[in-house]
Image (cartoon, grey):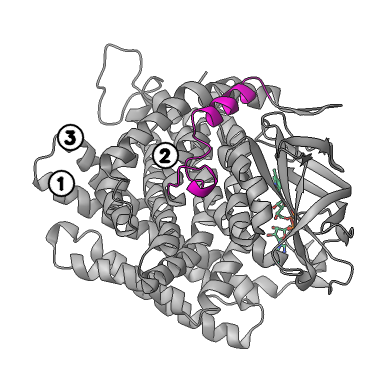
Amino acid sequence: MLSYRAPLREIRFVLHEVLHASHHYAELGRKDLNEEFIDSVLEGAARFAEEVIAPTNEPGDRVGVRLTDDGVVTPPGFREAYAQFVGDGWAALCGPEEFGGQGLPEGFGGPVGELFVSANQSWKLYSGLTDSALLCLEKHASDELKALYLPKLVTGEWTGTMCLTEAQAGTDLGLLRSRAEPDGEGSYRITGEKIFITSGDHDVAANIVHLVLARLPDAPAGTRGISLFLVPKRLPDANGEPGAANGVRCSRLEEKLGIHGSATCVMNFENARGWLVGEPNAGLRSMFVMMNHARLWVGLQGLAQAERSRQAALDYARERRQGRAARGSAKPDKPADLIVDHADVRRMLLTQKAFIEASRLLTYFAGMQMDKAKYHPDAAERQRGADLLAILTPVVKAFVTDMAVEVTNLGIQVHGGYGYIRETGVEQFMRDARIACIYEGTNGVQALDLLGRKVLGSGGQLARLLGGLIGAFCQNHAGYEEMADFVPRLAGLLKEWSEATEQVAQRAARDPDEIGAAAADYLQFTGYLCLAWCWAKMAAVAIAALRNSPDDPAFYQAKVATARFFFARLLPRAEAHLDALQSGSASVMALSTGQLG
Ligand SMILES: Cc1cc2nc3c(=O)[nH]c(=O)nc-3n(C[C@H](O)[C@H](O)[C@H](O)COP(=O)(O)OP(=O)(O)OC[C@H]3O[C@@H](n4cnc5c(N)ncnc54)[C@H](O)[C@@H]3O)c2cc1C
């Protein structure tokens, strides 16, 4: 079985040396979240991930979930690991203190979540949507609903789901048909079928709280007629404990490419009792609180799977011997050299390393904006945090998850034929990573969100904010000779990005297909720009550290060398995306639907 080692040195570098996390938390009034505290939480999480969760990953994939007359049965070890997750307080880490949580900011949950997802993504999905549901209920539910449900959700005794998708309504939720009728008792009766519901049923927790989108009888058509309801699997009794069964059940489990340990359920609501959350017909708006959180969380899944794949590939490349190294053999007494000595294998390993480490910085940085938007004492800073989060969320969700598919694919390639064999275990990482490009809004939809809604929809303001941040970094580091390999190139790319943004906006004003045709390349271009910024930042920190003769010079030298690799070998891809997005919509739309065949 492949082992998992929590990359704590890497995480500490990002949190403490690059993002100055304790300073960030102090600004938010949380001086208690100092370096020592952060490290102690990370060390505990690492132990839990390595020793308790990771051993469930392979059996989870092999055995999968089962639907029985009593509901869904999770794979071996999942229940026990979940019980410990709740018992040790991990579930409550970022929950509001008012409802029994430990009150750590959600962004802090990112690094901890990375460790848990790397250990077993399917297992983590049983609690994954609970955090998003909590945020949504905290913001939109009545005090009565909060008092009844939040304490159990916060501790993890109960879990949450997100029930949006129906067979005819995926991306286009305006098409959904589930109905909600008032029952004269202050609640509603929900009827309809939802598909693809993650953790819709399971045996890891005593109750499940479904957040369901449905239509009231007089609701207008389309997205303006959708309301949000809380529908428990079991109705709480007078003591708030799970009581009578509600009219909701899982009628089928989906067979899938990956995440076999995660229950993806068809859920049937038959006259199920539910309670309105937020205003009637404003359900989609309420749900967006949940979706934005969930999208960052999905980006983190990409990062976590990529890291897991990289560890396996590196271990293998350091022990597998094939052929002779072009530079001459380091071990002529052995029959062959290690594959890690071949330039092409190094290219693959470095591609993994370069993508993962910069994506980690970008993802954690975005998570911190979530905290800033919520807790910063200064309203202008809160708004700035919210704006940065708004533009970065689709980039993290789509770029990092696409990256994960490439990185996990390379993980297979480094293993050669053994990578394709199930027994080796690395093909699971690619299968598990693939879903993250699809759920929580496909990556195509993220691209439309970035370009259409966030960039053009804000009149360019959000793009200027992100560009301003990168531009300020370039200005602050211009003239430093050691940064000459990075800063001029980054500044040049930023200029191209800003110009391309304006040009797309001009074309979009004339051409209705422009945004759709340009969006995917615009997102990729933005992703490469952000990762170049992240690598330049990490290189600057590493160069400064090397000047002070650190204990661990090899670590910092590797950072600078990997930044060089990223700029030399991966960043040129940005220009291809720039060319593509600048080419207009004509080549995409030229063929008739028939001619596509
Ligand atoms: C394993 C798994 C777990 C899931 N978990 C949940 C869950 O917990 N809760 C839940 O509610 N849903 C869940 N989903 C559903 C998931 O969110 C949807 O599958 C996803 O949003 C896409 O919807 P769709 O499958 O209907 O595809 P479609 O919407 O039919 O899209 C098909 C293709 O068309 C593109 N497309 C669609 N509309 C547009 C447009 N306007 N412009 C450009 N391109 C467009 C898409 O990008 C995609 O490439 C899950 C799905 C899976 C597979």
Mark found first going from the N terminus, 2 or 1: 2
Mark found first going from the N terminus, 3 or 2: 2
What residue do we see at 51% from left, 79% from top? 458
Vertical order, 593 against 362 (above or below): below
Vertical order, 457 against 40 (above or below): below
Label 1 Cα crowd, 10 Å radius (few <14 / some 14-19 / many 20+)? some
Q: In 3D space, how far apart are the residues under numbered discs 3 and 2 (Cα atoms)?
A: 25 Å
- The mark found on residue 552 in the picture is 3
Residue 404 in the image, given as x and y percentages of width and height: 51, 44
* Residue receiving disc 2: 348
Q: Is residue 35 visible?
A: yes
* Residue receiving disc 1: 545
Q: In 3D space, how far apart are the residues under numbered discs 2 and 1 (Cα atoms)?
A: 27 Å
Q: Is residue 433 left or right of residue 481?
A: right
Q: In 3D space, how far apart are the residues under numbered discs 1 and 3 (Cα atoms)?
A: 10 Å
As drawn, the residue found furthest toward the front would be 238
Which segment did they paint magenta?
75-104
Residue 95 is a magenta residue: yes
Q: Which sits in the foreground, 390 or 495?
A: 390
Indicate which label's residue lies in the foreground, 2 or 1: 1
Instruction: Provide the secondary structure element on which disc 1 rests.
Output: helix
Vertical order, 592 against 261 (above or below): below
Q: Amino acid at mark 3?
A: Asp
What residue do we see at 76% from left, 46% from top? 196
